[in-house]
């Protein structure tokens, strides 16, 4: 299932290499129809209604979304839920580029003018990102949802190794 704040594409699970290739192609070629907002709660509720048998659900996201703990906790009670968190270092650290820049929140579209040369602003931003990650990690740990962390700067070979290890039951 591909989702933003709406369900963009739902493909029921099937067996076979052709189906797997079709799903991968859909993921790669998909262009979101909705603005770039994320509603994990809506996606979890959709799956709760659709999936009658116990299933493996892998949520791939940056998890920078309105909190979704109730719906995902319900999903976890009925299904095997795993998380793959994709992160980018530029989302947690703002470099000093010597002045003011305009940034936009991809979830809300809100635009802010920030002073990258202000070390206290950069530290508050870093701390807020760290606090969010801490809350997410605590939630995933508390609900026993295994999580794999992947950075956009990870080499493909490392990502492949992490995925292999994660799905073989190890920790990556």
Image (tube, rainbow, N blue to C red):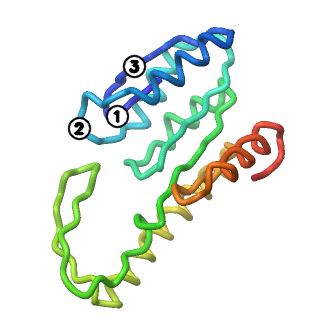
State the mark number for residue 4: 1
Q: CA distance from mark 1 to mark 3?
A: 10 Å
Label 2 or label 3, whichever comes before in sequence order: 3
Q: Could one spot residue 144 in this view of the protein?
A: no
Q: Is residue 70 above or below residue 3?
A: below
Tag 2 and tag 1, C-beta contact below 8 Å = yes
* Mark with earlier residue (2, 1): 1
User: Which of the numbered marks, if any, corresponds to residue 38?
Assistant: none
For the residue pair 67 and 164, the one nearer the viewer reads as 164
How many C-alpha atoms fall within 10 Å of the one at disc 3: few (<14), some, or many (≥20)? Answer: some
Secondary element at tag 3: strand
Q: Dividing the picture into quarters, in which one does residue 38 lie?
A: top left
Q: Mark 1 falls on what kind of element?
A: loop
- In the rendered image, residue 28, in percent from the top left (x then y), is placed at 45, 30
Compared to residue 81, the image places residue 112 above or below, namely below
CA gap between label 2 and label 1 equals: 8 Å
Above or below for 103 versus 78:
below
* Numbered tag placed on residue 9 in the rendering: 3
Q: Report helix, strand or loop for mark 2.
A: loop
> Residue at point 45% right, 76% down?
127
Task: State the residue at coordinates (65%, 38%).
Answer: 82
Q: Position of residue 84 (x, y in %)?
A: 60, 44
Q: Nearer the viewer, residue 155 or 151?
A: 155
User: Distance from label 2 to label 3 (Cα)?
Assistant: 15 Å
93 left or right, relative to 146: left
| Residue at numbered disc 2 | 35
């Amino acid at each position: 299932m591909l989702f933003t704040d709406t369900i963009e594409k739902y493909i029921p699970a099937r067996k076979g290499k052709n189906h797997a290739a079709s799903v991968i192609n859909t993921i790669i070629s998909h262009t979101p129809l909705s603005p770039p907002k994320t509603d994990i709660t809506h996606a979890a509720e959709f799956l709760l209604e659709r999936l009658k048998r116990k299933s493996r659900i892998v949520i791939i996201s940056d998890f920078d979304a309105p909190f979704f703990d109730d719906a995902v906790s319900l999903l976890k009670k009925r299904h095997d839920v795993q998380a793959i968190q994709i992160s980018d270092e530029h989302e947690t650290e703002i470099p000093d580029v010597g002045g003011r820049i305009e940034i936009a929140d991809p979830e809300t579209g809100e635009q802010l003018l920030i002073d990258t040369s202000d070390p206290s602003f950069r530290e508050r931003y870093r701390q807020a990102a760290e606090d969010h990650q801490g809350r997410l990690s605590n939630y995933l740990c508390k609900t026993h949802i295994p999580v794999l962390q992947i950075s956009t700067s990870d080499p493909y070979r490392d990502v492949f190794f992490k995925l292999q290890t994660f799905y073989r039951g190890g920790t990556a």
